[in-house]
Amino acid sequence: MAALRAALAASLAVARARPPPLGRRPPSARCSALAGAMEPAPRWLAGLRFDNRALRALPVETPPPGPEGAPSAPRPVPGACFSRARPEPLRRPRVVALSEPALALLGLDAPPAREAEAALFFSGNALLPGAEPAAHCYCGHQFGQFAGQLGDGAAMYVGEVCTEAGERWELQLKGAGPTPFSRQADGRKVLRSSIREFLCSEAMFHLGIPTTRAGSCVSSQSTVVRDPFYDGNPRPEPCAVVLRLAPTFLRFGSFEIFKPRDEHTGRAGPSVGRDDIRLQMLDYVISTFYPEIQASHPGDPVQKHAAFFREVTRRTARLVAEWQCVGFCHGVLNTDNMSIVGLTIDYGPFGFLDRYDPGHVCNASDTAGRYSYGKQPEVCRWNLQKLAEALDPALPLELAEAILAQEFDAEFGRHYLQKMRRKLGLVQTEQEGDGALVAQLLETMHLTGADFTNSFSLLSSFPAAPESPDLDEFLAALTAQCASLEELRLAFRPQMDPRQLAMMLMLAQSNPQLLALIGTRASLARELERVEQQSRLEQLSEAELHSKNRSRWAAWLHDYRARLEKDREASGDAATWQAERTRVMRANNPKYVLRNYIAQGAIEAAESGDFSEVRRGLKLLETPYGGEAEAASEVAAETGGAAGRRRSYSSKPPLWAAELCVT
Ligand SMILES: *[C@@H]1O[C@H](CO)[C@@H](O)[C@H](O)[C@H]1NC(C)=O
Ligand SMILES: *[C@@H]1O[C@H](CO)[C@@H](O)[C@H](O)[C@H]1NC(C)=O
């Protein structure tokens, strides 16, 4: 115990000495060795310089060839972090969209004349000189259970590009074909999910949230059969590939390949007992992506690993605080979807909150709600616990757990409140009741079914001064963001067959253990809540609802105005304060987030061969807080459009959006 305390104190002292980096993205890995050796004018893609450090630093296997040169079959990959792979060509690849700011990270511009070249290389149909495609081996806990070996089943490491700016970017092709980790799947991604990942990666970056980036989305005439709603209606869909960029795509799950046989699932990692590889991985990750930690712990590996785990814990806590503040729901927070450098990684059934609901679940198949919006902080902490277990003995578990207890909640709470205060325009010093004011705001949004993004955005124009005219107009705008009776009835419609519900209720009484065992207790509770809400709504008229909404908002705005008044007093000069407050709020409350219905519009157009909606959406999401592109695009949105469904990107979603099912 005393030893633990001493170790912890030592590790904390070092951590304190170093202010936590607050940058918008973690500094990318440096590439000093190659800087300077660049040609002055790169020949577009052929000018990219690769330096594949991960493959040099970590064990890589070359898989045995499959029958007649076919790619080798899915199998366990022991003793290696990567397995060499080869993208499988697609028929007639075509660029859907390129992200100029993402490609600029590689020193590339994105002229239209280069689209054919981009389609060729970013589909994986041709390999750039210096590229060494490989699939990464990792494990993971899926929905709380250890799943054994997972690995890059549809994504491939392509190599690391060193830029003239001295940065190192790992390139990855997602959807490039089968690897040893594909299990029963075909290693492909369809256009629909690729567009979602492409748009959201870029949208998150421009929101200021750490994330992997997306440089391109390429579609093709190859197809695979998918059942998008898992309802027995499979259809062929076009294959697509997304070019992803990040300092690294290593995950928490990358360290889980050493896990011995799990007592619940009976599964084991492929590299049990290989403590040497764990040390190799730690050394690679820390020296490449946490060089300041490497430098400050030359002689003491345990302290170095402790400082690393502390920093991963802090970054993860800040990341999930950012998600909560923008209403982002990841959807599948398995340990293999958690980046080792604190980025948002793997965009699947994610969603942004429309109507504020802490219980919102965006993966339609996650019926138990394990990964609901409100549970994300808790789940990230749980995932860090799994990372801690995976680092033992290189970092003794006891020490890692103490760090987690010491850092996670504190860092999350600090960052969350700091961000929320900015969203509310509280620019002076923090006050005792600020956390409660935020909680009451969320409660008000929940009770009135208010739109999360638009409510915050509207607050930026709240007439703060006590002498401003009465609140009627503002309240009317705010209540227009609340859910209508019709929307609420739709949101709370029961989802179970009444007979199924009756049976489960009976089971709950007669055999609660069995109910818990089959894991349906949570979904039963949710269904009961829906039934109850539904009957409450039955008895409510539109007028009653409206007046309720209004009075709830009026009460909160009253408190808010009082709090603003204190902030203004603390600042001295009212005009300066007002300007500062407006600036801070506009910079922290986005007007545009990638709502599902926006992505859906872009996907439907793209599936019929029109990529302009994807490109237009991308442009708008580059200035989520409002900007130049905005006005033009918004006009186009409101006047143009064969779809008839088009509306302004900042509108709260239309009713049909509630029926969108993302799996
Ligand atoms: C997250 O992890 C699981 C495997 O644990 C995987 O099935 C899922 O597709 C991953 N990615 C996303 C985008 O959810
Ligand atoms: C959504 O949840 C289901 C059930 O828990 C899970 O099997 C599925 O893999 C999840 N979806 C994705 C894309 O990971």
Image (cartoon, rainbow, N blue to C red):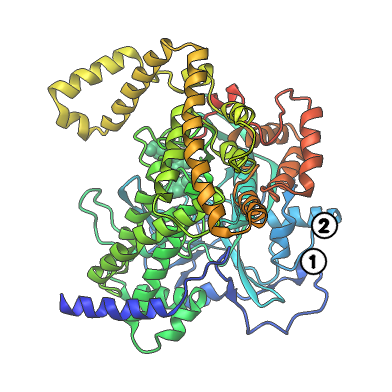
Q: Is residue 553 above or below residue 75?
A: above
Residue at figure coordinates x 26%, y 67% from the top left:
402
Q: Residue flagged by tag 1: what amino acid is it?
A: Trp
Please identify the quarter of the rendering in which residue 32 is found.
bottom right
- Marked residue nearer the N-terminal end (2 or 1): 1
Q: Residue furthest left?
A: 510
Q: Is residue 496 left or right of residue 215?
A: left
Q: Position of residue 598 (x, y in %)?
A: 65, 35
Q: Residue furthest right?
A: 113
- Tell me the quadrant of the picture where the N terminus can be found: bottom left
Residue 180 in view of the camera: no
Q: Which residue is mark 1?
A: 44
Separation (CA) of disc 2 from disc 1: 8 Å
Secondary element under disc 1, as helix, strand or loop, is helix
Residue at figure coordinates x 53%, y 58% from the top left:
570
Image mark count: 2
Beta carbon at label 2 within 8 Å of ligand 1? no
Q: Is residue 112 above or below residue 128?
A: above
Q: Is residue 506 left or right of residue 573?
A: left
Q: Position of residue 134 (x, y in %)?
A: 54, 63
Residue at figure coordinates x 16%, y 78% from the top left:
2
Q: Which residue is mark 2?
A: 114
Question: Within 10 Å of the Cα at label 1, are there few (<14), some (14-19), or many (20+) other Cα atoms?
Answer: some
Q: Residue flagged by tag 2: what amino acid is it?
A: Arg
